[in-house]
Amino acid sequence: MCFIHVIINALEMLGKGYDVKVVVEGSATKLAHEFENKSNPFYKQYNDLKNSGLIDCFCKACSNKMGSLEDVERIGFPTCSELMGHPSMARYIEDGYTIITF
């Protein structure tokens, strides 16, 4: 359920004019299929996040390990893998972002 906190905070910050990027890492990558699950009570929020363009990428290594890479790619989410298969946090820091983890 923690991923809903990522979603609602990212959408709120976008609405307040913040420059936001969501990087989906670790076990959260298993939730890719929830973006298509209309019976999910949070489907609207998942859909809002997907359509907002805030998802910068899903971790390719974690998506593969969690068995969700096929869903991630089929849905059309970008993947990041520049750091031994994972997104590079240094890249985001160098671009001026503050990293918030949930």
Image (tube, helix red, strand yellow):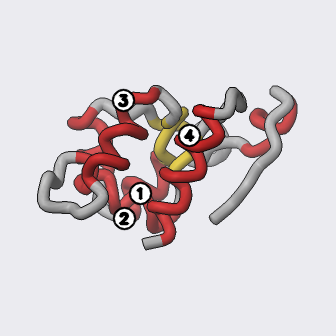
Q: Which tag, 1 or 4, sits closer to the chain's start?
A: 1
Mark 2 belongs to which amino acid? Met
Q: Which tag, 1 or 3, sits closer to the chain's start?
A: 1
Residue 49 screen position, x and y as percent: 42, 39
Residue 4 as seen in the image, left or right of residue 21: left
Mark 2 vs mark 3, CA separation in Å: 24 Å
Which residue is disc 1 drawn over? 29
Q: Residues within 10 Å of mark 1 (few under 14, many from 20)?
A: many
In this rendering, which labeled residue sits more in front, label 2 or label 1? 1
Q: Residues within 10 Å of mark 3 (few under 14, many from 20)?
A: few
The residue drawn where x is 45% and y is 67% is 27
Residue 92 as seen in the image, left or right of residue 58: right
Which residue is disc 3 drawn over? 51
Q: Quadrant for the N terminus, please.
A: bottom left
Which is more toward the observer, 84 or 62? Answer: 62
In what element is the residue under mark 1? helix
Which is more toward the observer, 38 or 66? Answer: 38
Which residue is disc 2 drawn over? 66
Mark 3 belongs to which amino acid? Asn
Q: Residues within 10 Å of mark 2 (few under 14, many from 20)?
A: some
Residue 20 screen position, x and y as percent: 65, 34
Residue 101 position by quadrant: bottom right
